[in-house]
Image: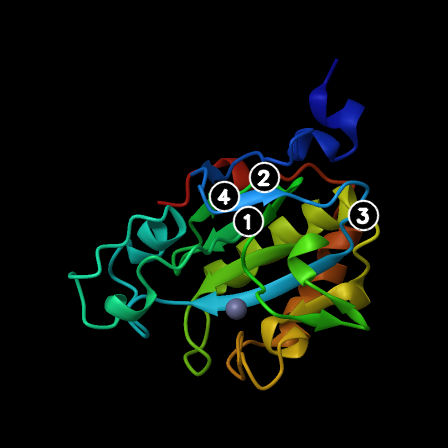
Amino acid sequence: MDVDERAGGYAEIDDAGWLAGAERRPSPSQDRRPPGTAIDLLVIHNISLPPGDFSGNWIDDLFLDRLDPAAHPYFRAIAGLRVSAHLLIRRSGRLLQYVAFEQRAWHAGVSLFRGRERCNDFSIGIELEGTDDIPFTDAQYMRLAECSRRILRRYPAITEDRIAGHAEIAPGRKTDPGPAFDWDRYRRSLRAEDRAAAAPDLSLDRPAE
Ligand SMILES: [Zn+2]
């Protein structure tokens, strides 16, 4: 049986919540979601290490809990932080997955969405490599649209109005993804992807780099 036809998109994400085509980098900074928790929020972030530098693999080290505090002055303050995200989209569009969606990644911290605290419990977190003020790349918007479409198909409780920036759920504490993130472009791309959903989309399965 043709996998795509059978699954209607579900095969793009397996039962554990690993996304086909993403590089799997299991993070030690994760745990189980509370039993019975519906996954119904998508949180968009940005991160770069050190801030504004897109050349290294330090985010990878941070999410794998092996960041060398001596490698850069900035790292002293954050090495040892136990943090992760489900997905990271690098500047090139390269896609890495650190936590399967069914598990709880540690990306939101103290947070509140429409009266519910601890957004990590019920959300999926996507990090875009970047800063609040530097435009994100075309490759990142394309990859983000692909990933989001697949996530929304697999987790239909995440409706379009349940996609939030980190700043929205942690106001006063967080500012990402920041003013450089073009929400209109992102939301338009989601709708365009919706219309194209019937067509096979294999682009995610090609290596980005
Ligand atoms: Zn964030």
Mark 4 neighbour class, 10 Å CA radius: few under 14, some 14 to 19, many 20 or more: many
How many angstroms separate mark 1 from mark 3 (CA)? 16 Å
Residue under pointer 3: 38
Name the amino acid type tagged 1. Answer: His
- Mark 3 or mark 2: which comes first in sequence? 3
How many angstroms separate mark 4 from mark 2 (CA)? 7 Å
Kindly identify the residue that appears in the image at 41 percent across and 70 percent down: 130
Callout 1: SS: loop
Label 4 C-beta lies within 8 Å of the nearest ligand 1 atom = no
Name the amino acid type tagged 4. Answer: Gln
Name the amino acid type tagged 3. Answer: Ala
Q: Give above or below for 172 relative to 31.
A: below
Marks 2 and 1 in Cβ contact (< 8 Å): yes
Marks 1 and 4 in Cβ contact (< 8 Å): yes
Marks 1 and 3 in Cβ contact (< 8 Å): no
Marks 4 and 2 in Cβ contact (< 8 Å): yes
Residue under pointer 2: 100
Work out whether residue 98 or residue 147 is closer to the camera in this orientation and state it: 98
Q: Give above or below for 145 relative to 164.
A: above
Where residue 4 sits: x, y (%)? 72, 27
**Mark carried by residue 53:** none
Callout 4: SS: strand
**Mark carried by residue 97:** 4
Callout 3: SS: loop
Where residue 86 sits: x, y (%)? 55, 49
**Mark carried by residue 86:** 1
Name the amino acid type tagged 2. Answer: Ala
How many angstroms separate mark 2 from mark 1 (CA)? 6 Å
Callout 2: SS: loop
Label 2 C-beta lies within 8 Å of the nearest ligand 1 atom = no
How many angstroms separate mark 4 from mark 3 (CA)? 20 Å
